Image (tube, helix red, strand yellow):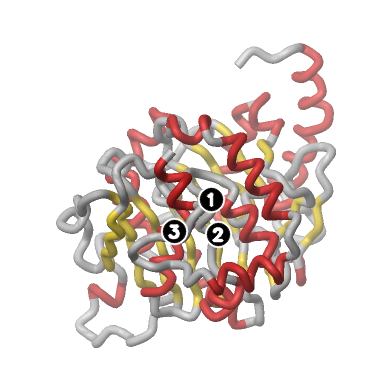
Amino acid sequence: MKRSLRLTLGAALHDWPVFERNLRGRGEGGGHWTRIANRRDRIRVGPGGIGALCEGRWTSRLHGCDVFPTLGRRLMARALEEWPLTFAERPIEARSAAPARATPDVSFVIGHRGLERLPLLSVVLASIAAQADASVECLVVEQSESPVLRERLPDWVRYLHTPAPARMPYSRAWAFNVGARAAKAPVLAFHDNDMIVPRRYAAELATIHRRGSEIMNLKRFVFYLDQAATRRVLAGGAISGAPDKVIQNLEGGGSVGVDRDAFFDLGGFDESFVGWGGEDNEFWERAAERSVWPWGYLPLVHLHHAEQPEKSRRDRRTAALLDERSRIPPGERARELRARAFGRAEGPDPPYRAEGAA
């Protein structure tokens, strides 16, 4: 991407020193990679110096990484050095001869549709199978006219199918709600099918949950790989080089941990949202009424895929719905959603049906 001299000089004078100070730091006195941000961002450090919160409602890209890809490469390498990614065919408990625990520590809930992203999902599942110091289960909710994944998933993955009418847009909210009802763990990790997690992700969710938090957003940065880097990972190669972009402030997007009882009390995800986006922002507004851990300190890696054509066509409608729903007090929204009996296998109530038939 061509950059003006002014942007390049600004990044060199303002962003580069921030990166250097925090990439080299290892503690409170010397800075830390989680505190890297854009020059106008306001950063708050978490309790005990754990994690960082970038104030602001919306996601943003790290400008320094866009101008100087080497900064993105060094940041990703530094984060993954501290929080390594590993892969396995089966979770530790599934590999052991000992009886599996009746209740796992964390239930990963993943929505999915179609075969195009199955290679990405397979790598994501391998990162979940490699989780250390916590017992996990994983539920994949396939939303389609007919089941196509059932025989294509590892046997340790719990498979759910929700029949979807023809031409119905994908509903992330519905998939998550259906999975949540079937999950067993006290902590639910609502997770996208293109996000690789470090091997202690579940253990960190369980730890923060035990300390009293009900809503946990532990991701500080999401490193987006380009097409070539994703191909290498799918072929069994290491994650290396410069990410295509570095994103912060995903809040409820990508992956978020939620106390199971709190999730149902909040009314789950709003199934009025179909397609991509909006449902995570709306849920985060209601979640703010609970005990929230917003200080991110973990890296996640996003695998490349083609943009969904439905996504761009629905941006305005999604933004308008989010604005409309945000005018209603969070507690009132939660009561309304609980009354809708969300997460039913046969599908949500209108306006979902009307939206899907359009």
Mark 1 closeness class: few <14, some 14–19, many ≥20 residues within 10 Å: many
Vertical order, 204 against 7 (above or below): below
Using the image as rendered, state which of residue 26 and residue 227 is in the foreground: 227
Q: What amino acid type should be assigned to the residue bearing mark 3?
A: Trp
Q: What amino acid type should be assigned to the residue bearing mark 2?
A: Asp
Return the x and y of residue 292 as percentages of the image width and height: 69, 70
Using the image as rendered, state which of residue 274 and residue 115 is in the foreground: 274
Residue at image coords 49%, 33%? 241
Give the mark nearest the N terminus, 3 or 1: 3
Which element type, helix, strand or loop, lies under badge 1? loop
Using the image as rendered, state which of residue 160 and residue 358 is in the foreground: 358
| Contact (Cβ within 8 Å) of mark 2 with mark 1 | yes
Residue at image coords 61%, 69%? 336
**The quadrant where residue 104 appears:** bottom left
Residue for badge 3: 174
**The quadrant where residue 265 appears:** bottom right
